[in-house]
Amino acid sequence: MAVTVAHIPEKIRRQTSWTATLRGYLFILPVVLGLIIWTFGPMVASAYYSFTDYKIIFPAGFVGAKNYINLFTRDKQFINSLSVTIRYAIMFVALGQVTCLALAVLLTQKVRGMDFFRTFFYLPIIVPYVASSVLWKYLYNKEFGPIDGFLELLGLPAVNWLGSQDTVLLALVLMSVWSSATTTIIYVAGLQHIPEELLDAAKIDGGNGVQRFIYVTMPMLSPTIFFNVVTAVIGAFQFFTPAFIMTEGGPAKATYFYNYNLYEKAFKWLEMGYASAMAWVLFAIILFLTFLIFRSSPLWVYYDGEVR
Amino acid sequence: MKIRSSVRSAVSGAYQRPGLRMEMVRKAAIYGLLILGVGVFMLPLIVMVSTSLKSFTEINSYPPSFLPKKLIFTNYAEALVYRDTMFPRWTFNTIFIIGAILPGVVISSSLCAYGFARMTFPGRDLWFMLVLGSIMLPPQVTLIPLYILFYKIGWLNTFAPLIIPAWFGGGAINIFLLRQFYMQIPRELDEAAIIDGAGFMTIWWRIYVPLGRPALISVALLTILGNWNDFFGPLMYLNTPDNYTLALGLNAFRNYFPLLPRTDYLMAIATLMVLPMILMFLLAQRYIVQGFVTSGLKG
């Protein structure tokens, strides 16, 4: 027995040797190789392409920063797609976070049968974007769509949801909010993590429901809000499928999202160099926005154990 | 005693009755909101199924009906064999791709997660940061070079670009999700196994794979869901109809009706595509929800 015990420290000590290092890397080898082959290598290539006029059929010629300069000075479609995406992102973040948080508050009330109700609210996450795009295109249809049919039954004017530049972004935002149950799920988990004692203490101190929500729930939930906002902003910049299927970027390029523009530049016009520059600008924008949200977070994100 | 208890009940009764009524009003309001919310959230799916069972004339007539006047189940049969569509083939392709991805994701993400959770070696934390950092990278940055790479090695219009990369770690989020779970498994189990002479592969296979089963199920289900629904990947790499997945097939199906869409057929196919995922969700909601929660907790 004593021999066995004496052996353990030696075995653990041996783990720091080069065999242990080798063994460690053997376990994480898939992802190390994966990152090198599918991420870092392509990143280097993409950075290089972005300084060339590469068009897949012709060899790449180095053009310096021309792609980047053209993007910001000559390309009206670039500015438009950026503006479309930012407007969508603002609407989606605002409407989506408020809706999902409100739903999460509702779904964490202590009443019987809540699990049963939650299932229905979570269900839209499993609907593929292709199917929901086909579905919502019909829902929004001006002539035969159920939404306008319902509005007309109420005596309200029909809305040309996808056909008008004024409503098309809102229409896509509403559809996205319907599909963003993941956000609701994360808020529900966040709300469930708030210690009961804190809310009880506030109750004893005479805080009403609204006060408890503002002074206890919101600060405790702020890291979750922070995460969901960052995810939503990044998601908005990845938005593609519904615009591709439902509106094809229209009407009049009102839903020509950044990602859609990039896709067409690369795979319709084969301007691989130019599209690579767009991808890096997108990365820079996402980094910048995440950084902004990060920097602003001390103002509104409260982490456990922090003294205020 | 008797007096005291009656006094107490009178006092508490007077005290409780308005509270009780408030509580009932509150519960009624919650159930009201819940039912309203379920109605709103389920309405699109109800319309989808309902429309898939309507006759073509009913869909295009005014005023619109909510439920079909007559159930036309033949819509499904007709949609599935419409002209030169290949829905059985597209379904098979989708299942084949998922079947080829799934073991790769499960095995490689679990191995990597174990390495990150339980082994000590120089560079481990750096690589873990790189794995997490790669989540932030928009896929567009690597999209073009990968497309060119797959073009040059002849992988375009094959399933390889969708399958092979999944075997390399199975996705950063999955590694993160499993690592979080593995960190909670007591180290004493490893130490006991080491004393018994077990190697690290044995420890992984005999302790971490079985004990980590709930997390592994989450990973597997999210992988199935993500690939069943994936549109952009197949759109990039598959271009002849015989290679389409269901998602591409449904998109192609739209274009069979350039003027007046056969909404009944489209909704029938959409319903068929959603149905297996709904069943999976209803059967394994716990694992799917837990998967979303854990991958969302890193914030």
Image (cartoon, grey):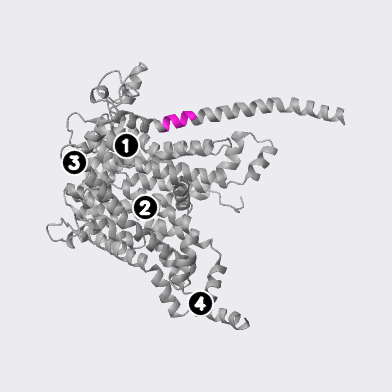
Q: Which residue is mark 2?
A: B223
One can see residue B66 in this view:
yes
Decide: few, some or many residues near mark 2? Use Cα within 10 Å; few <14, some 14-19, many ≥20: many
Residues at marks 4 and 2 on the same chain? yes
Where disc 1 sits, the SS reads: helix
For the record, the magenta segment spans B35-41
Dot 4 or dot 2, earlier in sequence = 4
Decide: few, some or many residues near mark 3? Use Cα within 10 Å; few <14, some 14-19, many ≥20: some
Q: Nearer the viewer, mark 4 or mark 2?
A: 4
Residue B171 is inside the magenta segment = no
Q: Is residue B158 above or below residue B88?
A: below
Residues at marks 3 and 2 on the same chain? yes
Q: Is residue A273 above or below residue B257?
A: below
Where disc 2 sits, the SS reads: helix
Which residue corresponds to the image point at 38% horizontal and 56% vertical from the top-left? Answer: B135
Specify the subunit that label 4 lies on. B
Where disc 4 sits, the SS reads: loop
Q: Which residue is mark 3?
A: B85
Specify the subunit that label 1 lies on. B
